[in-house]
Amino acid sequence: MVTTSRDVGSEQHGSDPATGRLMQIGEAAERVGLSIRTIRHYEEAGLIVPSARSEGGFRLYTQPDLDRLAVVKRMKPLGFTLDEMRDLLAVLDALDTATGADRAVLLDRLAMFHSAATARVTALRDQLALAEGFAGTLRGRLDHHTDQTV
């Protein structure tokens, strides 16, 4: 028997992920490219809740859970905090059903996240350019000194 924490559609373990197939944490970790430890940490931080638990208490995840983990994974290298991640996930969740003025507020918040992500990507590109320049300088010195010893 499977205990669900929310409606996951089909609960037949082994069916197609798009129709609600349940995966244990190891498979979920492999599919998303995160460690089991990281997924557990994100659960403790309130970013992800497994869709179900097996009778034995194993966490069970669906494709939408993995999609949520993928959002978090992509935010991490941009330096978003856990609170910011939680906030963006709440915005994304709420957008699915929001209407009218509520929807407009959520879209404004999503636009702010987009702006922040774009600014952070630009900063990372600048850092990468500096790092590549430094590596190039070292390569030049290495080549110069290697040529002198031959």
Image (spheres, grey):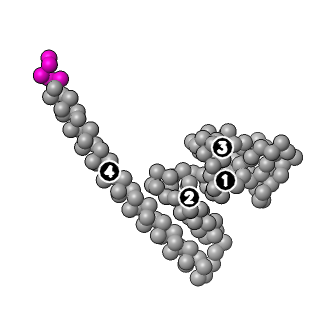
Indicate which disc, 2 or 1, sits on the residue closer to the N terminus: 1
User: What range of the chain is rendered magenta?
Assistant: 146-150
Label 4: which secondary element: helix
Residue at (50% x, 74% y) in the render: 108
Give the farthest residue toward the left.
Answer: 148
Using the rendered image of the protein, determine whether residue 64 is visible from the camera's viewpoint: no
Say whether residue 125 is left or right of residue 98.
left
Indicate which disc, 3 or 2, sits on the residue closer to the N terminus: 3
Q: CA distance from mark 4 to mark 1?
A: 32 Å
Badge 1 local density, few (<14 within 10 Å), some, or many (20+)?
few
Q: Quadrant of residue 4?
A: bottom right
Q: Which residue was labeled with disc 3?
A: 28
Q: Is residue 64 above or below residue 101?
A: above
Residue at (85% x, 45% y) in the render: 55
Q: Which residue was labeled with disc 4?
A: 127
The amino acid pointed to by label 4 is Gln
Label 2: which secondary element: helix
Indicate which disc, 3 or 1, sits on the residue closer to the N terminus: 3
In the rendered structure, are the residues bearing label 2 and label 1 in contact, judged by CB atoms less than 8 Å apart?
no
The amino acid pointed to by label 3 is Ala
Label 1: which secondary element: helix
The amino acid pointed to by label 2 is Leu
Q: Which residue was labeled with disc 2?
A: 82
Q: CA distance from mark 3 to mark 1?
A: 16 Å
Q: Which residue was labeled with disc 1?
A: 44
- Prevailing secondary structure of the magenta residues: helix
